[in-house]
Amino acid sequence: MRIRSLGVIDDAVVELSPGFTAVTGETGAGKTMVVTSLGLLLGGRADPALVRLGAKSAVVEGRITVPEGAAAALRAEEAGAEFDDGALLVSRTVSAEGRSRAHLGGRSVPVGVLAELADELVAVHGQSDQQGLLKPARQRGALDRYAGDAVAVPLAKYTAAYRRLRAVSAELDEITTRARERAQEADLVRFGLDEIAAVEPRPGEDTELAAEAERLGHAEALASAATAAHAALAGNPEDPEGVDASTLVAGAHRALETVRTHDPALAALADRIGEIGILLADVAGELAGYADDLDADPLRLAAVEERRAALTQLTRKYGEDVGAVLAWAEAGAARLAELEGDDDRLEELTAERDALRAELAGLARALTEARVEAAARFAAAVTEELASLAMPHARVTIDVRQTDDPDGVDIDGRTVAYGPAGVDEVELLLAPHPGAPARPIAKGASGGELSRVMLAVEVVFAGTDPVPTYLFDEVDAGVGGKAAVEIGRRLAKLAKSAQVVVVTHLPQVAAFADRQLLVEKTHDGSVTRSGVQVLEGEDRVRELSRMLAGQEDSQTARAHAEELLATARADT
């Protein structure tokens, strides 16, 4: 890992051992920047305050070996990353203005992709990072991870049933909610159809009735006008001396007929006057018939107006005219059939939901039994590890419990809350000494005890489902003496199956490392490329002596340092 312009580090290269690497140095020398750098490579939050004063940006570059076929490798390939002999080249740049860029395998990627890889590649533990495992949800995940297939198999079945139940319940809720709305809509449509059916309108009926009402409302005036027009055209029988249009036209036609043979033009005019006479006779006849047929019946007019009022009620609600009302009725009938079609689906979904809830309860019961069995083994293994970490009388137990919920599932006569991971709440409890009550580790352990509990948990995990790398940032704080030696021994044991990186002040821990890195500042207060050294031989003895007594050249401290190294080599 190369670090440039980050905190006190100007430009340094950190070479981590495949086994156990201890990072040591004076307080403030920049050891924590090594942890921070790894955090940035793994998608951690970018703080512009970390950029070295006077620099435009901080850059961390790393080469990470990823197991072939691992989930992290598949996720990297999805992001377009290219591998270099099985390793991923990762870089993270943080500008002084706060902008952050990430590259993975030669491709620019969102920072979130690096965070996804971190979950698969590194377990980070520090004085603050320990808080993660204090959460019950994380503890349940840890227990499930330890249990392996005994929990994973029923959990997979439970998760599938849970997802199906959620989908069915959501659809059922949607249909039920919609059913109320649809029932209301169906009532409105049904009422409208009944109202239209009661009136039985015919296409164009409103236009016909409007014309008839207009005619009946003015029957007397129409009859009087038709009679007067008839008299003007054909004469009035009651006034034989009166002059009418037909008589005058007939006289004009007779006058021209006598001379039409003398001039073709006049003959043509005579023919046209003859046509006028015929037309006048036809119109006069129709006028006479119109007047005779005109119905001035007030009862008929009342009936027409009543019918028009009924049609107006429909057009006010369902369309601008009778044609639109009939179109609404046709569409409404189709819609009503659709609205009434959800009943069968509702019954099917209700039956499936009830069956799924019963199935889920059975799967949850099996899941609980598997967790309880695994919890006993897990607690015993962690307790055994604590005995080797200078906590011989401590006892760890795991509480697997459920919470009552009236909306939950029925488990052996109890209605309990359920979620995507089952019905169980899991919590690690610690009784640090005989007679002490078992309390949640967040409340029952001191800082040093909590560090050892976390380490014991990781060592137990390492035998079941290890991640490739563990990073411990001064988790040995508050520990000393024999406990410190045992922590070093346990870290070395963990390093048999994974890469372990530890930032420590304890020589008892550093002595067990396969590689020890010393971080030290130059006279100007920065850490340069030469400021991160791999310690070997005499240099390592000198650093352990400094850590033991603060005196690199003390013969007593040197003897103790050599003894620590010899003890560590003998154990490993």
Image (cartoon, grey):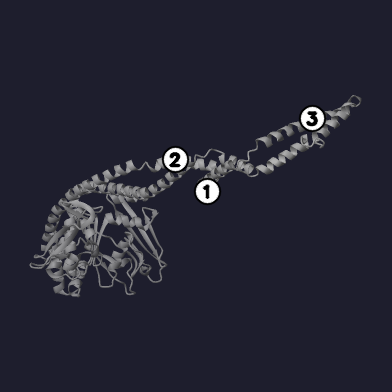
Of 301 and 426, which appears nearest the observer? 301
Q: Where is residue 57 in the image (x, y as percent from the top left)?
A: 40, 65
Task: Name the residue that disc number 1 marks.
Answer: 316
* Residue type, numbered disc 1: Arg
Q: Where is residue 107 in the image (x, y as percent from the top left)?
A: 39, 53
Is the residue under label 1 in contact with that under label 2 (CB below 8 Å)? no
Quadrant of residue 539 in the image? bottom left
Above or below: residue 371 compared with residue 477: above
Disc 3 secondary structure class: helix
Give the x, y percent position of residue 282. Answer: 74, 31
Q: Which residue lies furthest to the right in this view?
A: 262
Spatial separation of the CA atoms under disc 1 and disc 3:
51 Å
Q: Nearer the N terminus, badge 2 or badge 1?
A: 1
Along the polypeptide, which appears first: circle 3 or circle 2? 3
Residue under label 2: 333
Amino acid at dot 2: Ala
Tell me what residue is drawn at x 36 percent, y 64 percent. Answer: 46
Look at the image and tell me in which quarter the N terminus lies. bottom left
Name the front one of labels 1 and 3: 3
SS at mark 2 in the image:
helix
Disc 3 residue type (three-letter): Glu
State which quarter of the image contains the C terminus.
bottom left
Left or right of residue 238, residue 422 in this image:
left
Tell me if I can see residue 288 in this picture.
Answer: yes
Q: Which of 379 and 425 is in front in this view?
A: 425
Q: Is residue 256 left or right of residue 83?
A: right
Report, in whole angstroms, how far the alpha carbon at label 3 lies from the one at label 2: 58 Å
Where is residue 374? Give x, y as percent: 15, 53
Residue furthest top as drawn: 261
**Residue 275 disc label:** 3
Query: Image quarter for residue 430?
Result: bottom left
**Comparing labels 3 and 2, the label whose residue is closer to the camera:** 3
